[in-house]
Image (cartoon, rainbow, N blue to C red):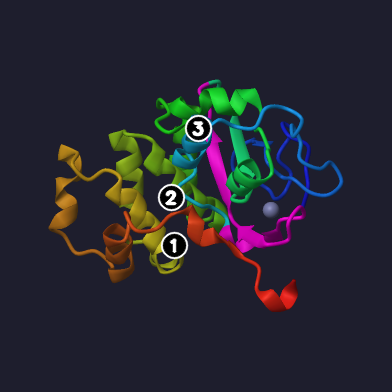
Amino acid sequence: MEFLDLTAYAYSESALPMKAVGWLGSEYGVQGGDATPLTGAELQLLKSASLRVRSLMLGVHECEFCWAVEGNGEFRYYLPSGVIHAAPTMIVHYAEEHGYRPPFELLSGLPEAMRPPWDWRAERLCAVLRDESADFVWRADAAVDLALWDDRRAYDALRSVLNDEELVDLAGSEVGRSLAAFSGRAYASDLADGYLHPVVRSGIEKASQIDYRLCVRPVPPLRR
Ligand SMILES: [Zn+2]
């Protein structure tokens, strides 16, 4: 799937309006490829802001420039302007291996996107997460994204779904990973004591061991 940078995100329906970045393919080539490649510091910043993967079930995307790697899932960047950018996990590979330079509005907003201030986007994610009738993928993505906000309201929303059996069965480890982001906060000290579903517990325990690199991997030799 290929989209021009900064067009409205249209890969699937989403709970919040977003813009597409890094959806590269053979038709438009490496967008921004004639610009200066990222510096080492810029690349490191992009990687640091690209740790949690969403929407894993939406399909695998192969690199159309080297055909050596494929990835699935997406990153979301909550920029200080209020705009959200959605990128395939392959965005890091494109920047690292193919000279792709993401749009300036993404690069300049990345430091704040790692810890966005509380706003309507966080409120909306809390509401989606708590809504048992909402689309399951939206709820699972909200559970991932809420870990970005260093705010008790995000923690409370995550706590509130621990008895939601369907969500815990399907996305419990992501809920656990997000809860782990609040460890050290006084209001999160109850987490260590009470009963937690084993899937949630395992997500908390593995929180520091998982990252996006698991979602971008070599294409098996037989398919190349
Ligand atoms: Zn490639």
> As shown in the figure, which amino acid type bears the numbered disc 2?
Ala
* Element class at badge 2: helix
Q: CA distance from mark 3 to mark 1?
A: 21 Å
User: Within 10 Å of the Cα at label 3, are there few (<14), some (14-19), or many (20+) other Cα atoms?
Assistant: some
In the rendered image, which quarter is residue 185 located in? Answer: top left
The residue positioned 79% from the left and 49% from the top of the image is: 25
User: Within 10 Å of the Cα at label 1, are there few (<14), some (14-19), or many (20+) other Cα atoms?
Assistant: many
Label located before the other in sequence (3 or 1):
3
The residue segment tinted magenta is 56-80
The picture places residue 116, in percent across and down from the top left corner, at: 43, 28
Q: Which label is found at residue 143?
A: 2
> As shown in the figure, which amino acid type bears the numbered disc 1?
Ala
> As shown in the figure, which amino acid type bears the numbered disc 3?
Arg
Residue that label 3 marks: 121
Q: Which label is found at residue 171?
A: 1
Are the residues tagged 2 and 1 within 8 Å (C-beta)? yes
Q: Is residue 169 left or right of residue 84?
A: left
